[in-house]
Image (tube, rainbow, N blue to C red):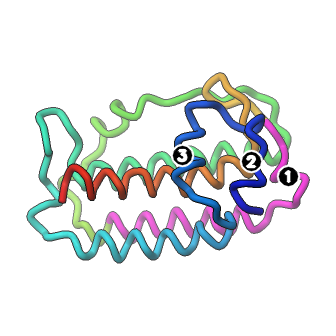
Amino acid sequence: MKTDQLPISEYSEFNATYIKAAGNVEMIEELEICLHDFIRFVQNIPMDKFDYRYAEGKWTIKDIIQHIIDTERIFGYRALRISRNDKTPLSGFEENDYVDNTNANDRNIQDLLTELSAVRHSNLFLFKSFSEEQLKRIGTASNTSISVRAIGFIIIGHQKHHQKVFLERYL
């Protein structure tokens, strides 16, 4: 399935930004391709940029990579719960609180990228395991309706959004 085949009724207006950022791609294929593109991209960033903040109070590149990891873990959990027909509304999360409570800036960049790869590969196996029926299931997360397949595209778009931020504000 490609992004342009995803009905807008399966995600919120807020998440439309990430769906659009994903591009018109096939979900499973792009989950793998964009991970490798991102790792290559980050490995070409000069070492002195990883702890750089373009303004006071803004996140570093390491903070953002940790944020991508944490967010993908949460999205994967949401996809699992919804795919299993769990009707429990899933709460949102405050991204700034998460970033404030990591030690991303004390970590080695390669360790962060390895962790991102592990999380993505875990989610790849998860999304590959879903039936068409499970991918179409809709649940509630952050007080809005969302489908399992929309979550897959959001994971892609969220990563691509932050890669664009790196280019525009950090490099």
- What residue is shown at x 65% (from left), y 22% (from top)? 143
**Which quadrant holds residue 156?**
bottom right
How many other residues sit within 10 Å of disc 1, few (<14), some (14-19) or many (≥20)?
some
Is 12 placed left or right of 136 in the picture?
A: left
How many other residues sit within 10 Å of disc 2, few (<14), some (14-19) or many (≥20)?
many
- Residue type highlighted by circle 1: Gln
Q: Are marks 1 and 2 in contact (CB under 8 Å)?
A: yes
Mark 1 vs mark 3: in front = 3
Span of residues in magenta:
112-138
Residue at image mark 2: 148
Q: Secondary structure at mark 1?
A: helix
Q: Which mark is residue 18?
A: 3
Give me the C-alpha separation between circle 1 and circle 2.
7 Å
Relative depth, front residue between 44 and 22: 22
Residue at image mark 1: 134
Relative depth, front residue between 122 and 134: 134
Say whether residue 119 is magenta: yes
